[in-house]
Image (cartoon, helix red, strand yellow):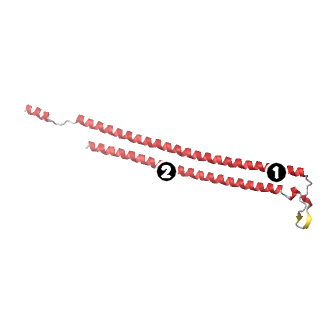
Amino acid sequence: MEREAERMFDERNEEVNYRTYMIEKNMNEQRRLIERNTATFNKALAEQQRREAIRAKEEETRLGLEEIAYQTNSDFLNEREGVVSGLGETVKSERFKGLSEEQRARIREEQNEQLQQLRRRRLMEVEENKQWSQQENMQVRMAQALDRQQERERHAEMLALAEHNRMQAEAAKTRTQKLNELYTNEVDEDYYKYWNRME
């Protein structure tokens, strides 16, 4: 009867350990799923923001280039005398500034330099955004690797705990068996021989 009780205790103990392990495992899986979905969402959001920023910079660059090209080729800067007004075949005198060819060349040179600086700045911004995106991806991968390592460690700890509990149950069972053997007075043949002599 006592051995049956010990067996039931051991089975119950193992069941509790197994249920504890499964609960921990399910909780960890849910947490990993949430973290993975969050990381995926953040990555997609960062990529979308990066692309939108690049498109905005490209649009700004395009408008800037168009403005520079317009100013460079404008009638005002080039002093085109054949430009007519909306009123008819009359020369628009306000287009003239009296700039010399050297002055116009210097203005074009400055505008070209501004254009090159604008292009370099846009390229640097695009490259910087690219590096930030790569760094974010690397951080996500490192976080995922760390999570996997922590999960392996938790799994090993749960297995070690289950093994420890099993060994304790085995030790308790062995102690109980020894105590039963020690305090059980079994009637053997010598017992009957002794009492037969006394008769």
Splitting the image into 4 quarters, where does residue 60 fall?
bottom right
Residue occupying the point 86% across, 59% down:
75
Dot 2: few (<14), some (14–19), or many (≥20) neighbours within 10 Å?
Answer: few
User: Which residue was labeled with disc 2?
Assistant: 30
Q: Report the front residue among 131 and 46.
A: 131
**Residue drawn at 76 percent across, 50 percent down:** 118
Q: Nearer the viewer, residue 119 or 87?
A: 119
Outermost residue on the bottom side: it is 88
How far apart marks 1 and 2 lie (CA) works out to 59 Å
The local secondary structure at tag 2 comes to: helix
User: Upstream in the sequence, badge 1 or badge 2?
Assistant: 2
**Which residue: 43% across, 42% down?**
158
Amino acid at dot 1: Gln
User: Is residue 129 shown above or below 179?
Assistant: below
Q: Is residue 177 left or right of residue 110?
A: left
Check disc 1: other Cα within 10 Å, few if <14, some if 14-19, many if 20+.
some
Please tell me whether mark 1 or mark 2 is closer to you in this view: 1
Q: Is residue 76 above or below residue 145?
A: below
Considering the numbered disc 1 on the image, is that residue within a helix, a strand or a loop? helix
Residue 165 lies, with reference to residue 46, above or below; the image says: above
The amino acid type of the residue labelled 2 equals Gln
Work out whether residue 171 or residue 33 is closer to the camera in this orientation and state it. 33
Against 89, residue 125 (above or below) is above
**Residue 111 shows which numbered tag?**
1
Percent from the top left, x then y, of residue 50?
Answer: 65, 52
Instruction: Classify the position of the C terminus by image quarter.
Output: top left
Q: Residue furthest left?
A: 199
Residue located at (91% from left, 57% from top): 96
Residue 32 percent location from the top left of the image: 51, 49
